[in-house]
Image (cartoon, rainbow, N blue to C red):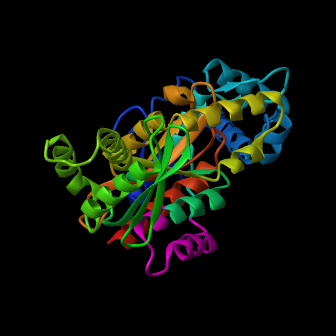
């Protein structure tokens, strides 16, 4: 059964493409993709996703349930290439799917496998345990997904703004200070801020005491406006340099509204072959470093229920690295979608295995948050 049929009949997985927010109920099938070439194409893509190597006619003749000679298969492969679904890398006699071909396969021909019981248990065990903070839970979920998929695990979540019990500034270099923030639930967060050159240590101590007294038992969001208003007041007794440290500290501690968690980048090196692959991975690491772009991309997955798949250059962020993301949103106790978790890897991902893995992880997070 093709994936599009499975999704429609069972409703178990809803896969969205990367270019719209609507599921694809029907496919734009190239003219000429009749039963025989469709079967050859499906088996070729499955063989490629399993091996990562170009697939030749001899390999296909052994896999196909049809009785076709290698010569007949080569003719079909040539037709598929003319449709823009396959191409021959370098001088290889084998073929690999284009991004257009992968999209057609994922949307209409992919058969989703069931999540293995040991994988299901591993996901739930890694994330179970009482007394964990939300941030630790989400980090464990990302780490678990990275380990099981052997790809990079990604998560975008709202910044956790917990009540604080301690704030301290420590000089680390000329013009730099470390802000140490300890929340009431025991989480410790460190940020580096810029400080005026020549700032005395006493000013850092005073800034820490000032912020600590006003933030203790409160979140940064609830106290920030009040503290900034007080800094503007003439009644404030802080000197100008200390006030600058306090203001800079508030801006840094507030940070971005969205947080990107990435785990398992080293898995991306497992698939490296020749020099071309090394360059692709280098480009992929550069893509990951552009966190703001990656957050915006993953945020797209929040706009609909179900798994979203982004393949290669369909998205500008991956135009050079040729990578794919499989992502799904998760909700809080009120049913509101609050974040996205997914997997990042080469376009030859094992989509049939990873889609249910991502989907299940997102559902487990939702249950735990509830």
For the stretch drawn in magenta, what is the main secondary structure? helix
Task: Where is residue 95? Give x, y as percent.
Answer: 75, 29
Highlighted magenta segment, given as a residue range: 115-138
Between residue 232 and residue 153, name the one nearer to us.
Answer: 232
Q: Position of residue 324 (x, y in %)?
A: 57, 39
Give residue 348's position: percent from left, percent from top: 66, 41
Q: Residue 340 in the image: x percent, y percent?
A: 42, 52
The part of the image, by quadrant, that contains residue 71 is top right
Compared to 273, does 145 lie above or below? Answer: below
Q: Can residue 264 be spotted in the picture?
A: yes
Rendered residue at 82%/34% (across/down): 56
Pick the residue in front: 362 or 100. Answer: 362
The residue drawn where x is 43% and y is 56% is: 13
Q: Is residue 351 left or right of residue 57?
A: left
Which residue is at the far bottom?
Answer: 130
Answer whether residue 123 is magenta in the image: yes
Q: Is residue 53 left or right of residue 23?
A: right
Q: Is residue 89 left or right of residue 356?
A: right
Q: Quadrant of the C terminus?
A: bottom left
Give the side of residue 360 with respect to residue 284, left or right.
left
Judge whether 124 appears above or below 100 on screen. below
Q: Identify the residue at the far top of this view.
A: 82
């Amino acid at each position: 059964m093709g994936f599009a049929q499975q999704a429609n009949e069972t409703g178990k997985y809803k896969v969205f493409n990367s270019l719209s927010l609507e599921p694809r109920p029907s496919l734009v099938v190239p003219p000429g993709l009749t039963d025989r070439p469709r079967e050859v194409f499906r088996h070729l893509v499955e063989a490629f996703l399993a091996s990562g190597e170009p697939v030749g006619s001899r390999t296909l003749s052994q896999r196909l349930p049809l009785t076709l000679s290698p010569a007949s298969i080569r003719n079909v492969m040539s037709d598929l290439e003319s449709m823009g679904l396959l191409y021959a890398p370098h001088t290889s006699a084998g073929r690999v799917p284009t991004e257009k071909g992968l999209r057609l396969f994922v949307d209409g021909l992919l058969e989703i496998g069931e999540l293995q019981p040991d994988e299901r248990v591993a996901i739930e065990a890694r994330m179970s345990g009482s007394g964990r903070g939300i941030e630790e839970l989400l980090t464990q979920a990302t780490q678990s997904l990275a380990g099981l998929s052997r790809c990079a695990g990604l998560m975008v979540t709202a910044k956790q703004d917990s009540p604080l019990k301690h704030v301290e500034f420590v000089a680390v270099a000329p013009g730099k200070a470390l802000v140490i923030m300890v929340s009431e639930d025991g989480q410790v967060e460190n940020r580096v801020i810029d400080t005026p050159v020549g700032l005395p240590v006493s000013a850092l101590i005073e800034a820490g005491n000032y912020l600590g007294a006003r933030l203790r038992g409160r979140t940064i969001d609830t106290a920030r406006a009040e503290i900034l208003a007080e800094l503007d007041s003439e009644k404030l007794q802080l000197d100008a340099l200390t006030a600058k440290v306090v203001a800079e500290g508030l801006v840094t501690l507030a940070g971005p509204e969205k947080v990107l968690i990435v785990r398992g980048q080293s898995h991306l090196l497992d698939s490296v072959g020749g020099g071309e692959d090394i360059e692709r991975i280098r480009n992929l690491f550069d893509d990951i470093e552009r966190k703001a772009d990656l957050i915006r991309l993953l945020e797209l997955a929040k706009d609909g229920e179900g798994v979203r798949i982004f393949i290669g250059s369909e998205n500008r962020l991956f135009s050079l690295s040729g990578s794919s993301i499989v992502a799904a949103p998760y909700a809080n106790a009120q049913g509101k979608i609050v974040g996205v978790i997914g997997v990042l890897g080469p376009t030859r991902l094992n989509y049939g295995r990873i889609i249910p893995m991502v989907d299940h992880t997102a559902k487990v997070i939702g249950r735990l948050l509830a």
